[in-house]
Image (tube, rainbow, N blue to C red):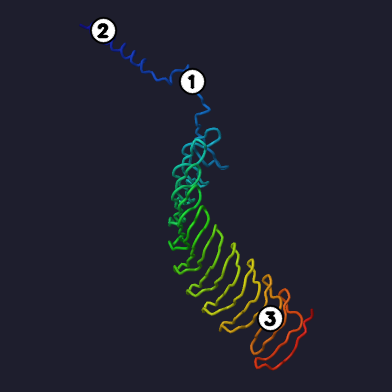
Amino acid sequence: MKRSWLTVIQVLILALVLVNMALKPDILDASRIDTTDWSTTPKYQKTYFNDGTLSSEGRNLNQNPVGWWKEYYENGELKSVGEFDENGLEKGEWVFYFTNGQIAEKGCFKQGKKSGIWSKYHTNGAIEYNEKFVDGKRNGYWKLYSSDKKLEAAGHYLLGEKNGFWQAYYDSAAVAEEGHFENGIKTGWWKRYYLNGFPSRVGQYENGERSGFWKFFYESGKLQKEGYFYLNEETGWWKYYNLDGVLESEGEMIGGQKSGFWRESVGDEKSEGNYKEGKKVGTWQKTSVKGAKREIIELGE
């Protein structure tokens, strides 16, 4: 009886040995190690700052990052995390962080370019803007918010450039400036306002530069000056008014400087004469407001 039990045990042990050999994993087959193509196998890699703290980590293949990667700030906080495709281009969702650990920006990449909705934040966690990307370029309606959640600007992007009507705002939500863009350049009529709602200036842009007729106002709403711009410089006939809206001076401007004939009023006196490159020249005649002739001044040139 004892012998038969021993025989059974021996048979079981032999069976276990045979099963173990049959299930032996291929990785233990040393004869196949030298056939592995290591050139197609990504290698895990870490980089470090000069002080030895971790700078980045992830897998690398043929000097290109592949798969998930993380980058860090020198203080050890996570800087970014996301995935690379087999060509080393960003893909899928990525998240970027501030040094304080708050999310700075997040969104998706497609073949290395921003795609779809992206969100950018202030360091306190408040949203700065949400925007849509198409092939790596801003596209569609866009709003910019301050760190205290107040609207600062709003308008449209088309293929990465500002296009159409835009507005900028004061903290009070009052409009600060408004006008049109074309391919990222100011064009047509633009208006800028004081905080009280009165206009501060109104005029036209051409190719991003002031051009044509412009008006400037005091905060009271009264006219301050008016005239023409050419290539962003005051050019042509200009008029200047005092705080009460009374005409003080008028004359010719060239390249942003007084040049040519001018009339000026100071107190009860009026004078007229010529300017050259912003300086009075030649003969100037002064008269009283009542019309009585007082003096003629010779300035030379």
Give the number of the mark in front: 1 or 3.
3
Give the number of the mark in front: 2 or 3.
3
Give the number of the mark in front: 2 or 1.
1
Query: Label 2, on which residue?
Result: 7
Spatial CA distance of label 1 from label 3 is: 94 Å
Amino acid found under the numbered disc labelled 2:
Thr
Image quadrant in which you'd find residue 217: bottom right
Amino acid found under the numbered disc labelled 1:
Ile
Residues marked 2 and 3 touching at CB (< 8 Å): no
Dividing the image into 4 quarters, which one contains the N terminus?
top left
Dividing the image into 4 quarters, which one contains the C terminus?
bottom right
The first of marks 2 and 3 along the sequence is: 2
* View extreme (right): residue: 301
Residue 79 at x, y percent in the picture: 49, 46
Q: Which mark is residue 33?
A: 1
* Label 3 environment density (alpha carbons within 10 Å; few <14, some 14–19, many ≥20): many
In the rendered view, would you say 32 is above or below 274? above
Residue under the image location 67 percent in, 87 percent down? 270
The first of marks 2 and 1 along the sequence is: 2
Residue 2 at x, y percent in the picture: 22, 7
Query: Label 3, on which residue?
Result: 262
In the rendered view, would you say 219 is above or below 50? below
In the rendered view, would you say 185 is above or below 221? above
Spatial CA distance of label 2 from label 3 is: 128 Å
